[in-house]
Amino acid sequence: MPDTMPQPAATRPAIHPGTRIGHVHLKVADIDRALAFWRDVIGLEEQQRYGDQAVFLSAGGYHHHIALNTWESKGGAWPPPGTTGLFHVALLYPDRKALAQALLRLLEAGWPLEGASDHGVSEALYLRDPDGNGVELYRDRPEAEWPRDAEGKLAMVTRRLDLNALLAEAN
């Protein structure tokens, strides 16, 4: 792979706006330990399993949103700081109540948060899975509510998310 990437042509069209990230495969050290988090704490449903090598999980019966595998990582350690790799995988919840219910699941499981932010465009919870992978659980605000500057450009922020106010919407 070259050290520098070619610059895109100014006339090349952007990626199709309907494009979505379909699924993420995570290298994990132990399938059962990872399942205890992704299935039992987060609440994804197991769709298919290949022994102790791989499992495919989703929301709503999709073939998979998250795949866990030990193909190159069985018994492995967290990646050391200062290395490249996945910063986090983000799960988008449909509304604030669903995000509040996700927070309640985390609290009931005793799973620690690393942070919670209001970005103006979204509200997000940040944590790590048992293999050190960053996880963001978030919901988007309606686009009409997104903060904009005087020129109408997006003006995202990072403010403390009021977890008590969020939890009040869990029921």
Image: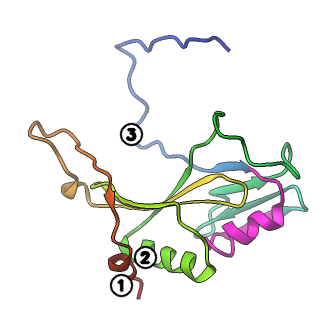
State which region is magenta.
Answer: 27-48
Reply above or below: 138 against 84: below
Tell us which disc is closer to us: 3 or 1: 1
Q: Which residue is mark 2?
A: 100
Mark 2 to mark 3 CA distance (whole Å): 29 Å
Which residue sits furthest right? 51
Identify the mark at residue 17; answer none if there is no mark: 3
Which badge, 1 or 2, is on the more N-terminal residue? 2
Amino acid identity at mark 2:
Ala
Mark 3 to mark 1 CA distance (whole Å): 35 Å
Mark 1 to mark 2 CA distance (whole Å): 8 Å
Amino acid identity at mark 3:
Pro
Residue 47's spot in the image, x, y percent?
73, 66
At x 85%, y 42%, the residue is: 72
At x 38%, y 59%, the residue is: 117
- Badge 3: residue crowd in 10 Å (few <14, some 14–19, many ≥20): few
Label 1 close to label 2 by CB (< 8 Å): yes
Q: Which residue is mark 1?
A: 168
In this rendered view, identify the residue nearer to me: 171 or 9: 171
Does dot 1 land on a helix, a strand or a loop? Answer: loop
At x 71%, y 61%, the residue is: 130
Does dot 3 land on a helix, a strand or a loop? Answer: loop
Q: Is residue 39 magenta?
A: yes
Does dot 2 land on a helix, a strand or a loop? Answer: helix
Using residue 19 as the reference point, say whether residue 156 is left or right of it. left
Amino acid identity at mark 1:
Ala
Using residue 69 as the reference point, say whether residue 5 is left or right of it. left
